[in-house]
Amino acid sequence: MNLVEPGSPGANLFARAGAMLTKPQETWDVVNAESTAIPDIYKTYVAPLAAIPAVCGAVGVLSLGGIHIFGVHVRPSLPGVIGEMVVGYVLALVEVYVLALVIDELAPYFGAARSRTQAFKLAAYSGTAWWVAGIFRLLPDLAWLFGLLGGLYSLYLMYLGLPKLMMVEGERTTPYLAVSLVVTVLLTMLISMLSSCFVDIGGPLSVNT
């Protein structure tokens, strides 16, 4: 028996994520024609995929007994790791919607067509590579590399999706993407700041010899 039944929500999720990663041009055309509501995209796509980096990051830290940074060993407490996982996950969900709002609000400045739903599709599905790359947080030493690659590929997915979903002309795609990148960086910084304010990942520090 298959672990994921054909036609089930899990199968649809894997199929869409795989198609977005391997056939982005064709998949954006399919997404553009869909009339799926924002809450449904959240429930069936964003929520499960956004959990990958959070859960894998927590498991990776706990399985290794902490984080090693420049000879310093950080031993997070279990409540701290769980708290950071939950806060990071919630903020990731918020980030998708805020990014969609920004994309929608910026549309007139780049000659694009405003649509909250289309902007949300773009923000949601372009994050596929970043979320899938979160699997490698199980191996903290490699997480940064695959996170970088996943982030770059997500930017490429957004670049391909902007003309199709927001109807922006070719020469305006790059500046539209650039502004979206700035917003994404700012949102990431905000998430980091909020996480550090509300979550204690502490534990004693020790210097490896």
Image: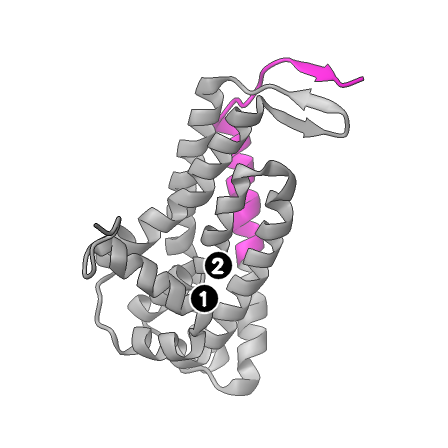
The verdict on residue 98 being magenta is no
Q: Residue furthest right?
A: 209
Q: What SS does tag 1 mark?
A: helix
Q: Is residue 175 left or right of residue 111?
A: right
Give the numbered dot on residue 31: none
Give the vertical position of 64 relative to 94 (above or below): above
Q: Disc 2 to disc 1, how far (Cα)?
A: 7 Å
The verdict on residue 207 being magenta is yes
Q: Residues within 10 Å of mark 1 (few under 14, many from 20)?
A: some
Which residues lie in the magenta part?
Answer: 184-209
Res 204 seen here: yes
Q: What SS does tag 2 mark?
A: helix
**Which of 44/6 is in front?**
6
Q: Amino acid at mark 2?
A: Ala
Q: Marks 1 and 2: in contact by CB < 8 Å?
A: yes
What residue lies at 57% left-to-right and 19% top-to-bottom? 202
- Return the x and y of residue 7 as percentages of the image width and height: 18, 61
Q: Amino acid at mark 1?
A: Leu
The residue to which callout 2 is attached is: 129
Q: Residue furthest front?
A: 1
Residue 196 picture quarter:
top right
Give the vertical position of 42 relative to 112 (above or below): above
What residue lies at 39% left-to-right and 77% top-to-bottom? 166
- Return the x and y of residue 32 as percentages of the image width and height: 31, 76
- Return the x and y of residue 88 as percentages of the image width and height: 45, 38
What residue lies at 43% left-to-right and 26% top-to-bottom? 83
What residue lies at 27% left-to-right and 78% top-to-bottom? 33
The residue to which callout 1 is attached is: 21
Give the vertical position of 93 relative to 182 (above or below): above
- Return the x and y of residue 77 as percentages of the image width and height: 51, 17
